[in-house]
Image (tube, rainbow, N blue to C red):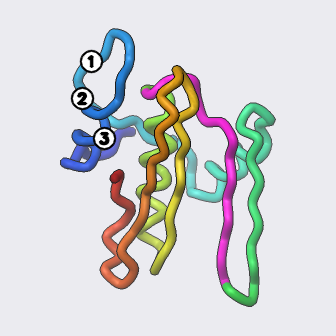
Amino acid sequence: MTTGIDDNWTQWWDSCEMYNKTGLKNIPTYTKENNRNVVDDLLRDSFFCSTEQYDDKEQQWNFTSLNFSENYYEILPMLAFLKQLGLYTESGYALIYDWMWGMKRLWLLSNSGRERHGLSLL
């Protein structure tokens, strides 16, 4: 499965430096039955070093993963997943630190509260 490419995706892709870069033609997504299964797979696989916590009182879910991939093509499904999760939130953000290849960039994915239009790659 794939997700649509909007201006945010294009701007982000164009800002990435990589070897043998091609145009962004599609964004693959996870093929799990539901979002919980995606998270459970990430939690089970030690490569990702993932954790989650849920605060019942604040109704706040925190998910942390220290590693997604060694290349941009493999991280696309995770970014699409994070963007999709934004559709279910009133507020929230994701911080992604690009530590590979010496680029050392920080990306902020956030949604705009009440508008609930999902996450934007900034």
Q: Relative to 53, does residue 39 appear above or below in the rendering?
A: above
Q: Is residue 80 left or right of residue 56?
A: left
Tell me which amino acid carries mark 3: Trp
* Nearer the observer, 76 or 13: 13
Question: Which circle, 2 or 3, is nearer the viewer?
Answer: 3
Tell me which amino acid carries mark 2: Lys
Report the disc number at residue 25.
2
Tell me which amino acid carries mark 1: Thr
Q: Quadrant of the N terminus?
A: top left
| Quadrant of the rendered image containing residue 53 | bottom right
| Quadrant of the rendered image containing residue 25 | top left
Question: Which circle, 1 or 3, is nearer the viewer?
Answer: 3
| Range covered by the magenta-colored residues | 59-72
Farthest-out residue, left: 7
Report the disc number at residue 85.
none
Q: Secondary structure at mark 2?
A: loop
Report the disc number at residue 22.
1
Instruction: State the CA–CA distance, disc 2 to disc 1.
Output: 8 Å
Crowd band around label 2 with a 10 angstrom C-alpha radius: few (<14), some (14–19), many (20+): few
Farthest-out residue, top: 20
In the rendered image, residue 27 lying in the magenta stretch gets the answer no
Task: From the top left corner, tell me how far across and down residue 66 is, in percent.
Answer: 69, 42
Task: From the top left corner, tell me how far across and down residue 115 is, in percent.
Answer: 31, 80
Q: Secondary structure at mark 1?
A: loop
Q: Is residue 96 left or right of residue 37?
A: left
Task: From the top left corner, tell me how far across and down residue 37 is, in percent.
Answer: 65, 52
* Nearer the observer, 15 or 53: 15
Crowd band around label 1 with a 10 angstrom C-alpha radius: few (<14), some (14–19), many (20+): few
Q: Are marks 2 and 1 in contact (CB under 8 Å)?
A: yes
Residue sitting at 36 percent across and 74 percent down? 112
Q: Relative to 57, does residue 79 appear above or below in the rendering?
A: above
Instruction: State the CA–CA distance, disc 1 to disc 3.
Output: 13 Å
